[in-house]
Amino acid sequence: MRAVKPYILHNTLKIIYYSYFHLIMTYGLIFWGSSMESNKIFRLQKKIIRIMMGCKRNETCGVLFHKIGILSLPSQYIFSLLIFLNKNKNQFTPYSEIHNYATRQQINFHLPQVNLTKCQKGIGYLGIKVFKKLPQYLKVEFDNPKKFKESLKNYLSVKTFYSLQEYFEL
């Protein structure tokens, strides 16, 4: 990337990023996105973003991700989990089916009780947990997949999360 950067337009660099790195990075992301090895890939992604933008090694990438319009690896992981949840929402139980009371939680999905850490790192469990932390305006759009996907991508692009923990603490 560094060798061709002086000769190529910024849009072309973005196309190269999506065709070579992003494609490989997102393959099966919902399965390995919470592993410790994902930190290595996230560091590599930040290195590529710095090269694309012509920044120094020690510069922060938070603003750069938003400027380019590329999701950071943790944001992409959150995006993948929520899209999976949206496509398979019939396999999860919303609170509105558990009881007939109109509560603030009725739009959320029921989080099953599990004791094993392996189950807590599973796609379904983490997907529901991530969904519960979404802003209300995004939860309302959940039934319209196209609009939800677009709004979610905009939200994650603006926030640029560096970890899943940072997302849960927001």
Image (cartoon, rainbow, N blue to C red):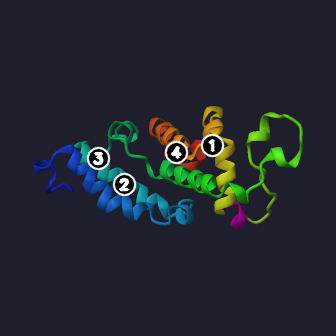
Looking at the picture, which amino acid does disc 3 mark?
Arg
Q: Which residue is mark 4?
A: 146
Dot 3 alpha-carbon crowd within 10 angstroms: few under 14, some 14 to 19, many 20 or more: many
The residue to which callout 2 is attached is 45
Outermost left residue: 7
Q: Is residue 110 above or below residue 152?
A: below
Q: Which residues are magenta?
A: 117-121
Q: CA distance from mark 1 to mark 3?
A: 34 Å
Label 4 CA crowd tier, 10 Å (few <14, some 14–19, many 20+): few
- Up the image or down, 109 lies above or below 39; here it is above
- Locate residue 126, reporting x and y percent: 66, 55
Mark 1, residue position: 142
Tag 1 or tag 2, which sits nearer the N-term?
2
Task: Judge whether residue 136 is colored magenta.
Answer: no
The answer to whether 45 appears left or right of 1 in the picture is right
How far is the residue under mark 4 from the one under mark 1?
A: 9 Å
Residue 124: percent from left, percent from top: 68, 59
Q: How many marks?
A: 4
Give the residue number, with chain letter if any, for mark 3: 50
Quote the CA–CA distance across marks 2 and 3.
Answer: 9 Å
Dominant secondary structure (helix, strand or loop) of the stretch shown in magenta: helix
Q: Amino acid at mark 1?
A: Phe
Mark sitting earlier along the chain (3/4): 3
Tag 2: residue type?
Gln
Question: N-terminal of the two: label 4 or label 2?
Answer: 2
Q: What separation in Å lies between label 3 and label 4 (alpha carbons)?
A: 31 Å
